[in-house]
Image (spheres, helix red, strand yellow):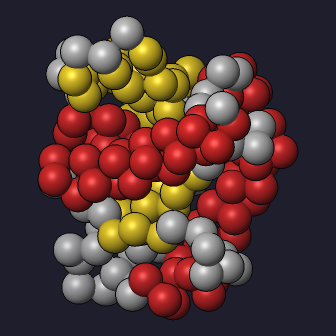
Amino acid sequence: MQTVKMVVTGPFSAGKTQFIQSVSEIDVVATERRISSDEERSVKSATTVAMDFGRITVDEDLVLYLFGTPGQKRFDFMWEILSEGMLGFIVMVDSTRPETFREARSILETFRAYAPTPFVVAANKQDVDDAWDLEDVRHALRLDGETKLLPCVATNRDTVKTVLLELLYSILKEMDSEK
C-alpha cells in the first residue's frame, strides 16, 4: 500500500480544519484551543495550535494522510516539522478576506522553500456573495497561469475531494516522471 502525505496550510481561519473534517474517514485528530485574543475571537472561537490529522483511503493501494498546519504566526515553528515527508501541499485562502492574501502568499513561498513538491491553491468560501472571483484571487496572490487555483467550499465534501484529486494527480504525474 502506498501512502501520500499532503499538508493543508494557509492563514488563520482560512478553513483548513474544516477542509480536513469534510473528507476524513477517521475522526480528525485536532489540536484546537480556545482563542484568547479579542481580535481573533471575532473571527472564530478556537484555533489549531499544533496540527490537524485526517486520513482518506482512495483505494486498496492508496491512502492519503492530511496534515493541517496552524495558521497563526506564533505556531509557525510547526510548519517545517509538518512539511517533512510531504509529497504535496494545499494553500487555503479565504476568498472573502483579502487582508489575508499577502500572508497566504508568504506561506506559499515558505512551503515551496521547504520542499519542491506539487501544490495547489484552494480559494475557499466561493459560495459566499462577497467572495473574490478566481482571477482576482490569482492576481492578488501573484500566481502564474501554471499554478492550479481551485474554487473550494471547505464544508462541501465534493469540492474538497476535487482539490485533493487535483493535487494527487500532480503528485502522481511527478512520481511517474521521476521513474
Quadrant of residue 159 within the rendered picture: bottom left
- Horizontally, is 146 left or right of 123 in the view? right
Residue displayed at 67% across by 79% down: 144
Residue 13 percent location from the top left of the image: 44, 51
- The answer, for residue 41, to whether it is visible in the render is no
- Identity of the residue furthest to the top in this view: 1
Specify the quadrant that holds the C terminus. top right
Determine the residue positioned at 28% across, 55% down: 162
- Is 155 above or below relative to 104? above
Q: Is residue 54 left or right of residue 172?
A: left
**In the image, what residue occupies the spot 47% across and 25% down?**
4
Expressed as whole percent of the image width and height from the top left, the position of residue 100 reads 59, 67
Residue extending farthest to the front is 179
Q: Indicate left or right for 22 with 48 as reference.
A: left
Q: Is residue 19 above or below residue 36?
A: below
- Give 54 or 172, whichever is nearer the viewer: 172
| Numbered marks: total | 0
Question: Residue 21 appears at what percent x and percent y?
Answer: 25, 33
